[in-house]
Amino acid sequence: MEKGERGDFPPKKAQSETPVKKLARQLDFTGFGAASAAVVLPEHPQQPPAQPLLRRTVKQMQPPPPQPQAQQQQLLLMPAQSQSPLPSIRPVKSESPRTRARTNVEVKDGTPKKQKQCNCKHSKCLKLYCECFASGIHCNGCNCVNCHNNVENEAARREAVEATLERNPNAFRPKIASSPHGNREIKEEEVLVLAKHNKGCHCKKSGCLKKYCECFQANILCSENCKCMDCKNFEGSEERKALFHGDHANNMACIQQAANAAITGAIGSSGYGSPPLSKKRKGQELFFGSTAKDPSIHRLGQYPQANHIKASGHSPFLSSIPATRASNSATLGPSKFTYRSLLADIIQPQDLKELCSVLVVFSAEAAKTLADQKNAMERQPEDRMESSLASSSSDRLRSQKESEVEKAVADDCSSANQAEKTSPNESSSDGVDVSKGRPMSPGTLALMCDEQDTMFMAAASPKGLMGHGYNTSSQLPHGQGMTEVYAEQERIVLTKFRDCLNRLITVGEIKETKCSSLARAESGGVKDPINVGAVNARTETRNQQEPFSNGVAKSSVPSTTASNNDLLSKIPSAENGDVKSKTEKET
DNA sequence: GAGTTTGAAACT
DNA sequence: CAGTTTCAAACTC
């Protein structure tokens, strides 16, 4: 259809700034990034974090992207208002898959170029059609015609913004939000997404396997929010898999061919007996019965382990996920890359068992030591060796098991998903899925710390240090409360666990650094800003994990801030700064 | 690079 | 809210 020439610019209405300009809107507007909270938070508690998350995943991985631009954007976002330094850059549409894609394309060679250049002709760049406008930034170096999205037309721009907000208060908010379900599924071969489209797509012909689809472009699965037809962008979709698998994984052309094939049924439907019709829904019905009316069911269909995954999703190791995804989209666009944990081949499943055992021992010793201490104190009140006990004993143990533990924990990252997927409810008390021999994720482990207190005592204790489980406390002198013992145990266990995690992170970072330099070396020593950015971003991620956690990780890693120094000092070789600077040096 | 397709945004 | 139109990006040739 040719939009032909509507001779005059559409602006008719476009500009027809709605007479209604409420201050509230301005607030909204101003709030894009941070402030949007005022409006957003209530409705979408997850959104705030989601935003940074996305920004990180998508942008931070790019070489220290156009910092300057970022600033510009921020300013632009808040034209007349104050300009609170919004951390967020492209709050809203920034998440627009399209925008992102474009941006990414431009960074292809690693050199951050323009972040985007719209080609608007009829919208004056004052409607959401315009990516720049939608992103909250001024057009700069674009190929647009009759652009009003600039400083010269700030007034008009503001009005347009207000009008837009009038229509949709969320217009400038991120479209992609981290899923409330915490869906995060990391498969070996593909980068799945940890978010979902707030509004969902409405694709009809693309099968949601082309960039026309915002979900696809954002590299996320379609969700219950979507109203697409014949969707093939769901977990388990063969068509979708076809896009990620194969030797052509890096070839856009081939990928698109695959997409086309999938859409036309050449690959999927016919191949898998799934009617080309509303595959998503039908498929899900197949999977989960036909009662997929409830959106949640729909979603669950895609993420059967949604809830469980959530538990492990925030495993510290997953901090690399965003990075991966980011670099992914930063280079090619939608998920053409394969995610593979840097620690994947370092850790073995059995290591996790060992870790669990070690923790159990720690726990047991802690209790025992505590008991002894109490006794000692009773006799020689002044002779206190307080905190030393637990750590001393545990340190000893740790030194023995250190390496194994490190490996074990990290491995969990990759294995947890599987474990949870297959038997979310079959985990045994020691953190290992006995039936399948699979370990649970650190996150899950941590989550279960409370239970573990019990479990450790009741079942674990390999050498019967505690032996009597629950009775322990009753054996303690002076009727010492269980809570005290538990608290100490928990403290020990979590502390040790935390140490392990941090070491693992360090290991991963080091490995990543190596990979980066390797890559650079291979590419003729050419700078690889993307990787550098990845490292940096990851480092940052690591430092900010908690803010982005949905609480799970947070609670699993005790008093991070408090003992941060201590923590770092325990890290063998490199630490954040080292890794980072190291990387930079190597470049 | 022109033309077509697509789906979000805008509008009725 | 559904249907239609407008728009610009994605895609094809």
Image (tube, coloured by chain):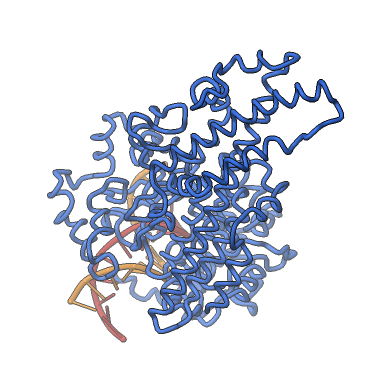
Chain colours: A blue, B red, C orange
Indicate left or right for A340 with A317 as reference: left
All told, the count of numbered labels is 0
Residue at 61 percent across and 42 percent down: it is A396
> Residue A368 sits in which quadrant?
top right
Residue A320 locus on image (x, y percent): 49, 56
Which of A138/A446 is in front? Answer: A446
The reply to whether residue A200 is in sight is: yes
Residue A211 locus on image (x, y percent): 34, 63
Q: Is residue A19 above or below residue A41?
A: below
Q: Is residue A405 above or below residue A58?
A: above
Residue at 33 percent across and 35 percent down: it is A422
Residue at 61 percent across and 67 percent down: it is A578
The reply to whether residue A120 is in sight is: no
Residue A430 locus on image (x, y percent): 47, 30
Residue at 81 percent across and 32 percent down: it is A384
Q: Is residue A89 above or below residue A230?
A: below
Which of A205/A358 is in front? Answer: A358
